[in-house]
Image (tube, coloured by chain):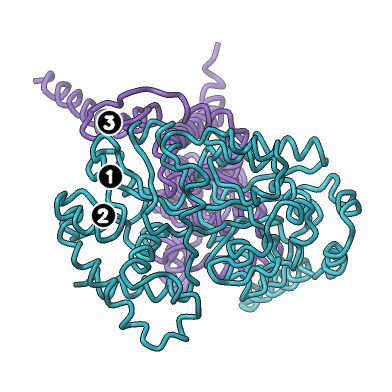
Amino acid sequence: MKKQPRFLSLLLIIGLFIFVLVPFVPLVLSSLSFGWRWPDVFPQGWSLRAWEYVVNDVRTWQAVGISLWIALIVTFVNLLLALPAANALVRYPVRGRWLFEAIIFAPIIIPPFISVMGIHLSFLRFGLTETVLGVVLAHIAPTLPYMFRAIMVSYQTLSVDWEDQARMLGAGAMPRFFHVVLPHLLPGILAGASLSVLISLSQYLITFIIGAGQVVTLPILLFPFISGGDPAIASAYSLLYGAIAIMALVGMDAALKRYYQMSRVPQQEKGVKP
Amino acid sequence: MKTYPLAALGTLGIILSACSSEDAGNATNADSLLTADWDAIQDTAQGQEVNMYMWGGSDNINNYLDEWVAPRIKQDYGIELNRVPMNDAQDIINQLLDEKIAGKTEGSMDIIWINGENFKAAKDNDLLWGDFTGQLPNFNDYVDADAPEVSEDFGEPVEGLEAPWGKAQFVLVHDENQHEDPPKSMSELGDWVKQNPGQFTYPAPPDFTGSAFIRQVLYETTGGHEQYQQPAADIGNLEERLEPMWQYLNSIEPYLWREGETYPESLAKQDQLYASGEIAMTMSYDPALAASEVLKGRFPESTRTYVLDEGTLANTHFLSIPFNASDKAGALVAINELMSPAAQTAKLSPENWGDLTALDLEKLSPEQQQAMNEVDLGEATLSIEELEQNRLPELSSDYIDIIEEGWTEYVAKE
């Protein structure tokens, strides 16, 4: 009886693997192809032209750096905004809670460029266009709802009793937050942060309008090649983009888990270790 | 307590708006550049960083600027040329429009690459700096300033607001091995599609190239281009005159790709259909594009381009300087350099780009002419002479709007 679930899970893993990886196959082939005409299943010839262009262009690597930098700052700011907001809205009887939630979730429903058109003029007056700061501020609108939602769900499963208990044992506000609340929220934070990083990395229109060509992220380099119909270079950029996104997620996951372990393990094992 | 957040927002607003105080010194300083002598301009340009905003979707064009032009300008004039990739020239205009409204005087666009509708929009909204082409030595020496393709941009007088960078011409693209004798006029095309149903189509307007194809039809089916050299509003019976064009387009429709039920939404899509062999012909407003697609392996090697017997549309693309450019001296020197015979000859080579020169060949020295004639354009591209002899002028953009709307009304819907 035990073998069947294992067989099933293996099948599931293979299925997922195919589902995730197969779409990458045409991208890889297209980025390396030299002539790929219907009805051939494989390209007629191979060429490194697209990769040479993408890898040799200094802009590519600057764009990778700036994209990641923006995504990380955006995620960090989101965390600072979402934690107190979720705390207040979940745990305290706030009047007009629906209104606050509606405001925070609005960017999911309202297309971002509608707001960005208006933001652009104000940012121009404030001198925030063409700056990383301006782009970061503009990226917060579409990413915050996801961070907020993830942390809100985590808060809903955290009873105030835990903190009361810690308080009775003499813990101040800071230790209570870092040792009681934060570890419980961490899975939610991780989920929210992953979405925040991914959504920030994928912004084209907002970055383009607010960054005005001076803040060049990967999507800014990629889009003209899609519209200009150079599938080889567009594929190469897409693959690079995918790799960066996956690396960012895995890296963040590892970093947060490490933090999680480091902040807990020493206290539990203090007396036990020989 | 309740008013506190509002007060905070208000304070923030005041602080931020204080940061955007205007700087008027730049404008008066820059206008003297329009009369300064060239040596003084070159001195001012030294050490400036020039941002060139342009469409960034071709690795050839990008490499030409990054690897051929930029290092030379850096070495010869100490100017840093920084190419900024854009998705569409329209975005440049929208951006400048917002900057104008917001009163931004220190803009980051120093050179912009525009023509046609975008130039008209920029000119109508006062987004361009001024009459600067007379300051450029290479413009004065090598360009025929009175030629209609230089003094007008899609019917709009240029007035020195932009300098010609290159020329483009409409060509049809076919595979020599598939059809040896392609249709060279609209009436031949009409017969050809009936013999080869499903093998021809054109991108749906407002695609730039698809719209140009329809103008090509307009010239041939309504009796020539001369009648349209006046504003559209001056022609009383315009709708009647356009009627044969709609009839023609509707008459070929059932024989098009997918029986004309749908059209490729862009030239990129149409090129894909041609590259994959689904249709026998495509078209291009860039006479060297097919050659470069052959080099990239996308189009079959037997791909050739040709012009129609009665000639094809031609236009010029230009470089301009926005009203609020921060480094105008550097922009002047860079544009002058982009128009030099050496840079124009390099641009002509399909390995770099394959774009036709904006210079007047007759004004070049014999050596410079020879260098240009020796550039191997590739088998798919027609010779410069053949293209030159078959040039037809473009229409002004008011016609283009009428034609694009009419196509949706009379062809797409029926």
At mark 3, the secondary structure is loop
Compared to B400, does A12 lie above or below?
Answer: above
Quadrant hosting residue B328: bottom right
- Amino acid type of disc 3? Val
Q: Residue at x 59, y 51 (%)?
A: B166
Q: Chain of mark 2?
A: B
Q: Are marks 1 and 2 in contact (CB under 8 Å)?
A: yes
Q: Residue at x 47, y 40 (%)?
A: A186
Tell me how far mark 3 sits from mark 1, CA to CA.
Answer: 24 Å
Whether residue A52 is visible, yes or no, is yes
Dot label at residue B201: 2
Compared to A48, does B64 lie above or below?
Answer: below
Whether residue A184 is visible, yes or no, is no
- Residue furthest top in the image: A274
The residue identified by callout 3 is: A22
A77 to the left or right of B219? right
Q: Quadrant of the N terminus of chain B?
A: bottom right
Circle nearer the N terminus (1, 2): 2
Chain B display color: cyan
A29 to the left or right of A148? left
